[in-house]
Image (tube, rainbow, N blue to C red):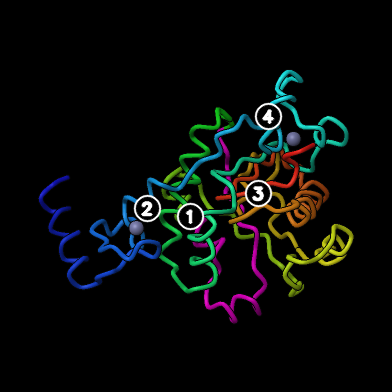
Amino acid sequence: MSFSQVLKHCSQALFYPQACVLCQAWVSNPDLSPLCRHCFLALEPLERRICFYCGTPLPGDLLQIQGICSQCRSCGTAFDFARAYGCYRGKLGSVIRKFKFSGHQRLGHPLAELQATCYKNSGLDLEPDWIVPVPLHAQRKRERGFDQTLILSRALSRRLEIPVFRGLSRIQPTAPQSGLNLQERQRNVRDAFRLSQADRLSQRTVLLVDDVMTTGTTISEICQLLRKESTIHRIVVLTVARVQLYLHQ
Ligand SMILES: [Zn+2]
Ligand SMILES: [Zn+2]
């Protein structure tokens, strides 16, 4: 670290002192603030072998079937690939909730760092042309005060040097998906999105970015729209975390 960087970090720490959101220790690295380096390094990646397509962790007894989960073998997915850094639980789940619901917008930086690491280590050398954030409706953004997926996307854009595409918007203020069954989730997001500047996605590969992937219903709705209204080439879903739903299939 250069002297000027040390000076910058010291002055930031002096003027914007932060306690770590997980352990309350003093945060000395402003790049990760308000998360300390110890807690950042403790955020666990997915360790099990994952499905080649959807990225879901595979039970050990399925490893011999070419590393593809039962869902992808039977009906495929609306996207080409999906990857997540870790599981939505433990410390990672806690940091994401503090990012989304406690107003700690700066946590978008360390979380985007995890996404960048996840993509670089994925082996998917697809040279994406665009980062496409899963959009928040304007009303929800007003309530929350910020758009967490846009923050992640911009931070990821700087790390991967891929521009952010802003032509996807949410035109219906859909209710939160949590607590709904699959049919209700599908109904909830049907026709909720609109695509403009579709020609800019023509023959392109995109990283569709969200914070957490649960059942993938919202993601599927967006993928169908992108494929219907543009001649998009490939869609790679990249989230910070995923909820493990198919572990026992
Ligand atoms: Zn900490
Ligand atoms: Zn799969």
Report if the beta carbon of the residue with label 4 is closer than 8 angstroms to ligand 2.
yes
- Circle nearer the viewer, 4 or 2: 2
Percent x, y of residue 81: 68, 37
Question: Which residue is at the front of the view, 34 or 193?
Answer: 34
* Residue extending furthest toward the left: 3
Dot 3 falls on a residue whose secondary structure is helix
- The mark that comes first in sequence, 3 or 1, is 1
Q: Residue 142: within the magenta?
A: yes
- The mark that comes first in sequence, 4 or 1, is 4
Q: Which residue type carries mark 4? A: Phe
Question: Which residue is at the front of the view, 170 or 74?
Answer: 74
- The mark that comes first in sequence, 3 or 4, is 4
Residue range of the region highlighted in magenta in the rendering? 127-152
State how far apart marks 4 and 1 are (Cα). 26 Å
State how far apart marks 2 and 1 are (Cα). 8 Å
The answer to whether marks 3 and 1 mark residues whose Cβ atoms lie closer than 8 Å is no
